[in-house]
């Protein structure tokens, strides 16, 4: 049972992280009865009279400390404040039998200057969800995970990793965001500026990225659109099986940009690109460019062909040809324009 994977006894930080990984792996397994049960419990909170119980606690966080939040069923909202304390406010909710609330415990540990918040379900089949509102110091590093619930982080200046199995994920004004993931839900990220890498992924949901400046950007969705605007990166990997891909931003000299959409259009709106080599193909769509591409040494013919007639595959050069753009779609159009 999923609840049994979370022991009642206090755990070390490493053990808590391993417990969370086990829960997530179990939740992702095909046909997992536990995942179905928890999702139904969360989504069915409006059935019957609600019983609730509030929890509040403050814990000091070291200057270089990390806050880890692990939840099974319920939303998590994290904002930032002044000082060096982590303020944890939570509401346990259940429908019908109020005795179910006692079977769910909120465990808060302070170890080595870091803070660990974990929801422990001690009962075998409770229908209890826990919604968290947490305020952390602005510089705190964060790991936030929910199996069934939405996760939102705003204003955190430390490294941030956010995940949900069944729920939307949003990270806004988080300059050092590293990962934002959902299995069943939309992912939205904005205000990221770092020399590192950023990964934003969803299996069943769209991915939106705005105001992003990173070294490497990875975007992916199985059944959702990918939309990236005001982006600056040296390397891009964007993959969608059933959705459109939009990229608006800059192209760096020597950069590599790989976009793959199986059944959707690909649109690029580029801001003063210095140049690139384009390898583009679409099985049943066309390729159009507002930029004067050179194919076989004839820039004029390439530009006119791209604008007016369309083609199913193209290898061409624009400007200094320093960057590499590889764009593939099976049943969609490829459109390149200048901002």
Image (tube, rainbow, N blue to C red):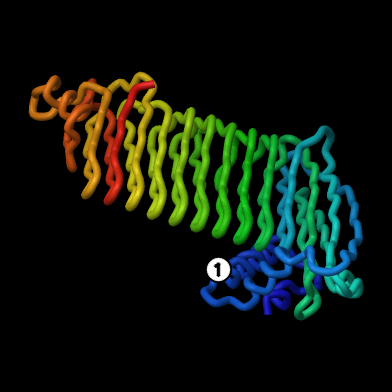
Total labels: the figure holds 1
Residue 92 sits in quarter: bottom right
Q: Name the residue: 22% across, 48% down.
A: 284
**Vertical placement of residue 140 versus 54, above or below:** above
Note whether 100 is above or below 197 in the view shown.
below
Q: Quadrant of the C terminus?
A: top left
Q: Residue at x 9, y 23 (%)?
A: 298
The residue that mark 1 highlights is 28
In the displayed structure, does residue 294 sit left or right of residue 272? Answer: left
Please tell me which residue is depicted at 32% across the width and 52% down the height of the picture.
262
Residue name at image x 72 percent, y 41 percent: 140
Query: Can you tell which quarter of the image residue 75 is in?
Result: bottom right
Give the quarter of the image for residue 87.
Answer: top right
Q: Secondary structure at mark 1?
A: helix
**Residue 237: x percent and y percent?**
38, 44
Question: Viewer-proximal residue, 18 or 193?
Answer: 193
Quadrant location, the N terminus: bottom right
What x and y, as percent, mark residue 58? 88, 48
Q: Position of residue 242 (x, y in %)?
A: 40, 54
Q: Residues within 10 Å of mark 1 (few under 14, many from 20)?
A: some
Q: Nearer the viewer, residue 324 or 197?
A: 324
Q: Is residue 318 left or right of residue 84?
A: left
Residue 117, x across and y down, in percent = 77, 57
Q: Is residue 325 above or below residue 20?
A: above
- Depth order, front residue of 303/258: 303
């Amino acid at each position: 049972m999923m609840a049994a994977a979370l022991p009642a006894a206090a755990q070390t930080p490493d053990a808590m992280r391993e417990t969370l990984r086990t829960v997530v792996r179990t939740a992702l397994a095909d046909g997992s009865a536990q995942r179905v049960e928890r999702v139904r419990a969360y989504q069915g909170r409006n059935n019957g009279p609600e019983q609730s119980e509030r929890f509040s606690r403050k814990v000091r966080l070291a200057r270089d400390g990390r806050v880890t939040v692990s939840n099974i069923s319920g939303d998590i909202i994290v904002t930032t404040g002044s000082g060096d304390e982590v303020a944890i406010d939570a509401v346990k909710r259940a429908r019908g039998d109020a005795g179910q609330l006692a079977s769910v415990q909120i465990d808060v540990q302070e170890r080595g200057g870091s803070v660990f918040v974990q929801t422990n379900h001690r009962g075998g089949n409770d229908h209890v969800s826990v919604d968290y509102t947490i305020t952390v110091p602005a510089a705190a590093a964060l790991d936030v995970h929910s199996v069934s619930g939405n996760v939102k982080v705003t204003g955190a200046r430390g490294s941030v990793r956010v995940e949900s199995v069944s729920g939307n994920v949003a990270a806004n004004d988080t300059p050092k965001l590293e990962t934002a993931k959902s299995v069943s839900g939309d992912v939205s990220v904005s205000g990221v500026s770092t020399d590192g890498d950023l990964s934003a992924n969803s299996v069943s949901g769209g991915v939106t990225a705005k105001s992003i400046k990173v070294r490497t950007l990875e975007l992916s969705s199985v059944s959702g659109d990918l939309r990236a605007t005001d982006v600056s990166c040296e390397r891009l990997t964007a993959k969608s099986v059933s959705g459109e891909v939009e990229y608006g931003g800059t192209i760096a000299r020597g950069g590599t940009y790989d976009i793959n959409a199986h059944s959707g259009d690909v649109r690029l709106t580029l801001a003063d690109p210095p140049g690139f080599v384009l390898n583009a193909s679409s099985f049943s769509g066309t390729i159009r460019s507002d930029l004067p591409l050179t194919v076989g040494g004839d820039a004029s013919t390439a530009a006119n062909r791209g604008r007016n007639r369309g083609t199913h595959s193209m290898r061409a050069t624009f400007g200094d040809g320093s960057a590499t753009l590889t764009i593939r779609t099976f049943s969609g159009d490829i459109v390149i324009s200048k901002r």
